[in-house]
Image: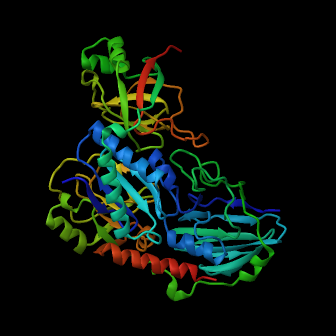
Amino acid sequence: MFPTFAPCGDSALLVTLGDRIDLALNRRVHALARRLVDDPRPGLVVAVPGYATLLVHYDPLLLGYDEALEWLQSQVRRVQEGGDEAFPAPRRVVVPTLYGGMYGPDLDFVAEHCNLPAQEVVRRHTARAYPVYMVGFAPGFPYLGGLDESIAAPRLPSPRLKVRAGSVGIAGAQTGIYSVDSPGGWRLIGWTALKLFDPARSPASLLAPGDLVRFVETQP
Amino acid sequence: MSSSLYVLEPGFLTTVQDLGRPLGEPLGAPAGGAMDRFALMAANALVGNPPGAAVLEFALLGPSFQVGFSEACGVLVAAAGRGFRLEVGGRAIPLWMAAWARCGETITLRTEGGGWGYLAVSGAGGIAVPEVLGSRSTCLRAGFGGLEGRPLQAGDLVPLSEAQASDYERAGLELPEELRPVYSDHPVIDVILGPQPDAFTPDAVESFLNEEYTLTPACDRMGYRLSGPALSRRSTGELLSEGVAFGAVQVPQDGQPIVLMADRQTTGGYPKIAVGCGTSLPLLAQCPPGGTVRFRGVSVAEAQERWRRMQWTISSIG
């Protein structure tokens, strides 16, 4: 059934490699994206990775739909033939984080909700490395996988009007870092001084799909 | 020496825009760019710029400027879009026409109904703000690009590229009437079904292609919310988040479609019933709240042929 290829309007094509959140599947998406960057052809504009999809924007003046489709089909075949061993080792990124108090105003709520001492929530949050499945929603915002379900917590009933960039939060069984100041409904447990998005920096996004993120507790 | 425009009245939501920032999308930065790409490209072509050069975009309320000193003793300008009138030094200039504005003269965009308006100024790069991630578009969400990442304010100096003395010779050049878009409050929008038409019931696809949808007041650079017969989905679940294209028609649980526009988030998890075609999106962008649209399904080949013809129209200017 997979892969599937479908037009997204007259200048993009959606490649779907599967229909679940799965690390191996997601790595194939990023391997495909990398192939297109390393071996581009005229008319390729940009490829945007999702959990299990790659949205390929192309310029129809240089590349027709049928040509684009044929090209992408052959690239997908090559990625699948390459096998999972061909993927490079993930980059590891440490995110120093201040937990609780003014930095994480919802840490106590999460602790109470999970029936754990606040320090145990922090210990469990820092105990794992989280893979970056994709960057989206807001500039530099990483979709992280693999939260310990014992510290999952519901979203706020109504979102805050402004959440400071760098805030570390939990929403359901997800954890994430606000990359720019924005409204938001995640439970905030901490804050990092790292700038997740800086357009003047290269690369502008601190985190890239495929990275492994580790939170480390620091003190002010 | 290059010139600048001094902002007298900032208008509403006046920002620097070009064809957008695709390189930002894998980093989560909205693609941005002009809402009406035909008007952007035509205005640029009229003043002799490359079609994707940076211009000023404004909405509802037009800005006014004073032309600063330049060695060419003026700048060539052209306004395009819907719902504005251009005045240069008190002279009325139609939209879709290049005009010479002398140093010290005032350029005024007067509202006449108001939609999305564009002002292009001659000079290879157009508005000469620095490129960020390959584009000069303003990203309001994260406050970068354009002029300091924000809408223009009174007193700003908008930097321009070097003008050429020969630009003067293009004054009076106009886009023939029959090549201009036919903006309407009731446009027909060509769409390509997919990428998830199977996520909807056959009745929903039928309604989408045959019924009228009304633009609600919730329409902005991010998206246009429509209201009309609800589009029912086969399943209630959401998709895994995936990249979304300009013009994608996403359908949340309530069945009311939202067309994703220039400043859309880069990824979304609602199924999409169709994606608007590049030649039709300007008509949708310029349809006001309260207006109604009908959608017409076309093939990818047909849409790409129309797009080629539109590009040919633009390249034939001047």
Residue B86 occupies quadrant:
bottom right
- For image coordinates 24% across by 48% down, the residue present is A18
Q: Position of residue B47 (x, y in %)?
A: 67, 75
Q: Image height check: is B22 above or below B119?
A: above
Q: Is residue B288 left or right of A83 when viewed as pictured? A: right
Q: How is the image coloured?
A: rainbow
Q: Give me the residue at 56% from left, 57% from top.
A: B13
Q: Front-most of B192 and B157? A: B192
Quadrant of the frame with the C terminus of chain B: bottom right
In the rendered structure, the answer to whether residue B146 lies left or right of residue A166 reads right
| Rendered location of residue B110, percent (x, y) | 61, 71
Q: Closer to the camera, A165 or A202?
A: A202
What percent of the width, then of the height, locates residue A211?
42, 33
Q: Is residue B147 above or below residue A168?
A: below
- Examine the image and state in which quarter residue B300 appears: bottom left
Q: Position of residue B213 (x, y in %)?
A: 29, 68
- Whether residue A5 is visible, yes or no, is yes
Q: Measured along the vertical axis of the image, is residue B317 above or below residue B226?
A: below
| B68 relative position to A148: left or right | right
Residue nearest the observer in this picture, B309 or B55: B309
- In the depicted view, which residue is nearer to us: B253 or B160? B160
Relative to A92, residue B68 above or below: below
- Judge from the rendering whether residue B123 lies leftward or rightward of residue A110; answer left or right: right
Quadrant location, the N terminus of chain B: bottom right
